[in-house]
Image: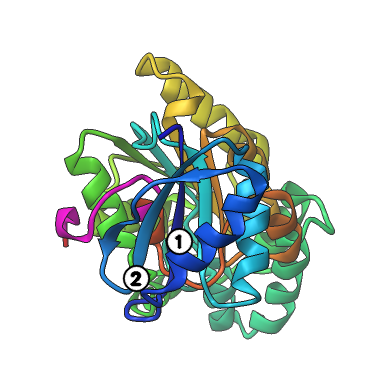
Amino acid sequence: MQHVLTLIAPPGALPGALPARIRDALTPLGADTGTPDWLSEAEAVDLPFTGLATEQAEAAARLALDGAAVDLVAQPAEGRRKKLLIADMDSTIVTSETLDELAAYAGLKERVAEITRRSMNGEIDFATALRERVAMLRGLDVSALEETWKGVRLMPGAEALVRTMAAGGAHCALASGGFTWFTSRVARWAGFTSHHANILEDDGRVLTGTVAEPVFDRDSKLATLKRLCAERGLPLADSIAVGDGANDLAMIGAAGLGVAYHAKPVVAASARVRVDHSDLRALLFAQGYRAAEFVA
């Protein structure tokens, strides 16, 4: 079969009858569907099809789902497994916004979080917003970094995504508009091959209120994706990118499989693939991995 439609839901929430319902929606449009292939019982299933463009199949499937809490990806069957993963960190690989949590130790969490929200929604320039937020932290004791780190948690499915792809030979890169102080630790924890982010400056005792220039921003994420692919002789089609904020849009748009993960409205509206209901293991199912193949 030329194409595959993958349906993904939280564990145990995918009805066994759903593939038949989707098949009934595709057939009148001229699609020829194959036998459903369950990647994880009651969680993820592949429905092979031909005779219909992926965009048409996805639109028809969404209508048939009628608002059900199911994520779906329609794509060519060939080349599904990617050789490079590039992922945002805050609110993607980890559950929090680390800069907002750091600002809490300066009594500024709400003010900083509001700027973060506007930046991630594309309402204000990312680099400008980052410099403004960091400047507000001038004089904060560096011990606040360790205290913030204690509260960092991996997003459900993050470690399975990274370690499974790495075990399959993929380069896994963490690309964050946050800080290397956190990305270095998250990278080790989750199993990333490399990490790329901003450098938060201090004088050994307190934060100076500055970041090293140039700021690692939206364009930097895209450039990192392209460089990592070029260094490995990979076309962009062999990459997968995932993020939730406006500064992730360029890399999401350029990757072979670009995914908006529980994303801000501007990102969800722009990305072709959205994961709104499932955890990060959805990106493995989208690549055709079976649950039995996951590296825990």
Task: Please determine whether, in this image, residue 59 is positioned above or below residue 257.
Answer: below
C-beta proximity under 8 Å, tags 1 and 2: no
Decide if residue 44 is on the left or right side of residue 164: right
Who is closer to the viewer here, 267 or 120? 267
The residues colored magenta run 285-295
Q: Which residue is mark 1?
A: 7
Decide if residue 73 is on the left or right side of residue 187: right
First in sequence: mark 1 vs mark 2: 1
Identify which residue is drawn at 69% across, 73% down: 112
Who is closer to the viewer here, 153 or 31? 31
Q: Is residue 151 visible?
A: yes
The picture quadrant where one finds residue 79 is top left
CA separation in Å, label 1 and label 2: 8 Å
- Element type at marker 1? strand
Numbered marks: total: 2
Task: Please determine whether, in this image, residue 78 is positioned above or below residue 137.
Answer: above
Under mark 1, the amino acid is: Leu
Q: Is residue 91 visible?
A: no
